[in-house]
Image (cartoon, rainbow, N blue to C red):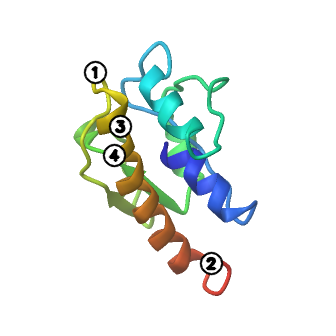
Amino acid sequence: MAAALLDHHAGGGVTVRSAGSAPADTVNPAVVAAMAEIGLDISREYPKPLTEDSVRSADVVITMGCGDACPFYPGKRYLDWALPDPAGRPVEEVREIRDLIDDRVRRLLRELLPGDA
């Protein structure tokens, strides 16, 4: 959700990668539904594993509770967004998580792209 929201709001102003330390086999259907409600189609997306290269090439790394499983490189800006995991939750609860992520994404973009977001 964070990658799709960031990509959407940034309008090409940032490069976004999404990956997980323990990715599922498929994207959660409730997440797909919650994102579709706001006009973002992530139905063709798939979970990707986190790689050291993706972290190494990033300026900002947003984690969501991966702890020691996430590679750490000095000089990178790390943000840990402590949010509920949408896994196994109904779409009503996923909407709330989506909205929390959307708020954080918008705040981050105001820092990264002042005047554009």
Mark 2 closeness class: few <14, some 14–19, many ≥20 residues within 10 Å: few
The residue tagged with tag 1: helix, strand or loop? loop
Foreground label between 2 and 3: 3
Q: How far apart are marks 3 and 1 (CA)?
A: 9 Å
Looking at the image, is 11 positioned above or below residue 114? above
Q: Distance between the residues labelled 4 and 1?
A: 13 Å
Q: Mark 3 points at which residue?
A: 94
Q: Mark 1 points at which residue?
A: 88
Tell which circle, 2 or 1, labels the residue nearer the N-terminal end. Answer: 1
User: Which mark is on residue 10?
Assistant: none
The residue tagged with tag 3: helix, strand or loop? helix
Name the amino acid type tagged 3. Answer: Val
Foreground label between 2 and 4: 4
Q: In this view of the protein, which residue sits in the foreground, 57 or 90? A: 90
User: Which mark is on residue 97?
Assistant: 4
Instruction: Residue 25: give x, y in percent of width and height.
Output: 47, 12
Looking at the image, is 101 positioned above or below residue 74? above
Answer whether labels 3 and 4 touch (C-beta < 8 Å). Answer: yes
Instruction: Residue 72: give x, y in percent of width and height.
Output: 36, 50
Mark 3 closeness class: few <14, some 14–19, many ≥20 residues within 10 Å: many
Q: Distance between the residues labelled 2 and 4?
A: 24 Å
Q: Name the residue under label 2.
A: 113
Name the amino acid type tagged 2. Answer: Leu
Q: How far apart are marks 2 and 1 (CA)?
A: 34 Å
The residue tagged with tag 4: helix, strand or loop? helix
Answer whether labels 2 and 4 touch (C-beta < 8 Å). Answer: no
Write down the quadrant of residue 45 in the picture.
top right
**Outermost top residue:** 25
Q: How far apart are marks 3 and 4 (CA)?
A: 5 Å
Residue 19 seen by the camera? yes
